[in-house]
Image (cartoon, helix red, strand yellow):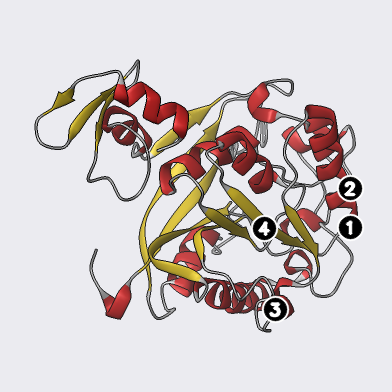
Amino acid sequence: MSTEEGKKVSRKKEIGKNGVVVEGRGVYDRRNKLNELTGEEWVYFTNSVWITGYSPTATENVGLKYRKIHPSPKPPGLIRDIIKFFTKSDALILDPFVGVGGTLLGAAMAGGGRTAIGIDLEEKYMQAYNKVCETENLKKMQYVIGDSKKIMGEKNSITEKKYDLIIADPPYSDMMSKTRTGQRVKLYDSPGATPYSDKEADLGNMNEERFLASLREIIEDSARLLKNEKYLIIFCKDFQPKGKQTNLLHCKIINELNKIDGLEYKGMRIWHDQAMSLYPFGYPYAFVMNQIHQYILIFRKVQNGGKK
C-alpha cells in the first residue's frame, strides 16, 4: 500500500486474521496480491457495466482541450481507476498505443509511485500530452515516438523491462477514416474523417484482416514483457452492422488474442459513457444504434496454461 494508505491502516483495528479497516474505505485483506483496494472497492470494480459521465472540464477528463486532437481520447480518470485495480504501488505500466497519453496521465493520477511508458507513431500526440502535464502540473512519464511493431520486436530499454500491467487502446482498423457522425461531430465541430495518422504502419489505416494480424503481433510481443499472472487490457468499439456483416470487432479481437500462448481472456467491462449524446440516426425510417459504449477486454498472462 502507499505510505498515506498505510498510515490510515495503522490507525484502525484489525478484523480476523487478515483484515484491517482502512479509514473511510472499508476492509483491506493483507492477502491481496493484486491491488490496494478494500473488499467493497474490489467488488464495485467487477461490475460488468461501468457508467461514467465525465464532463469536458472534469478532473477525470484533465486536459481534454489539448487531448481532443486525438480521434478517441480516453478520460485519464477512467484509466487511473483501471490502474488502481490491476496494480499496487510502484507498478510499471506499458501502453503500446499511447496516443495523447491517457495511460501516462492515469498512472500519474493513480499515485503510489506508479510509472508508465507509452509508445506512439505521432509526435503531435506527444506534444499534446506534454502540454497537459505542464498546465496541470502532472508528473511526465516516458513517451517514445516510434512503431510499436518494430520496438516490441527488438532488444532495447523498453523490451528489457518487465511490466505489471499493459493497457492498449489500438486504432480500430479504419473506423476513424470514415466520415464523422453524432458525438464526434459535436466534439470536433466538423463532419470530416479523423484518421489517427497518415502513416502506413498505423493500424487505423489497415483493413480488418491486416489490423487483426498486426494487433496480434504487437500484443504477443508486449505480453512477453508482462509479469506472470498480471493483466493486459484492451479497449475496443464495434462497427455498425452492415447487411449480413455483424461487425462485432470485440469478438474478433478476443478470439484472435486468445490464441496467444500464455494469454487468456478473463472477461470484460462495458464502459457506458453518459457524456455521449444521443442522435436520431435512422429516424424516421429504420433502427440505427447509438453506440455510447466501448468494451474493456481483460486478459491475463498465465504460466504453463494455468487456469487462474
Quarter of the image where the C terminus is located: bottom left
Vertical arrangement, residue 215 with respect to residue 26, above or below: below
**SS under mark 1:** helix
Q: How far apart are marks 3 and 2 (CA)?
A: 23 Å
Label at residue 123:
1
**SS under mark 3:** loop
Q: Within 10 angstroms of label 4, few (less than 14), some, or many (20 or more) residues? A: many
The amino acid type of the residue labelled 4 equals Ile
Q: Distance between the residues labelled 3 and 1?
A: 20 Å
Q: Which residue is depicted at the point 67% across and 58% down?
A: 117
237 left or right of 198 in image: left
Vertical arrangement, residue 196 with respect to residue 110, above or below: below
Label at residue 156:
3
Quarter of the image where the N terminus is located: top left
Does any portion of residue 193 appear in the rendered image? no
The amino acid type of the residue labelled 1 equals Glu
Sooner in the amino-acid sequence: mark 3 or mark 2: 2
The amino acid type of the residue labelled 3 equals Asn
Labels 1 & 2 near each other (Cβ < 8 A): yes
Quarter of the figure with residue 144: bottom right
Q: Which residue lies furthest to the left in this view?
A: 16
Q: Distance between the residues labelled 4 and 1?
A: 15 Å
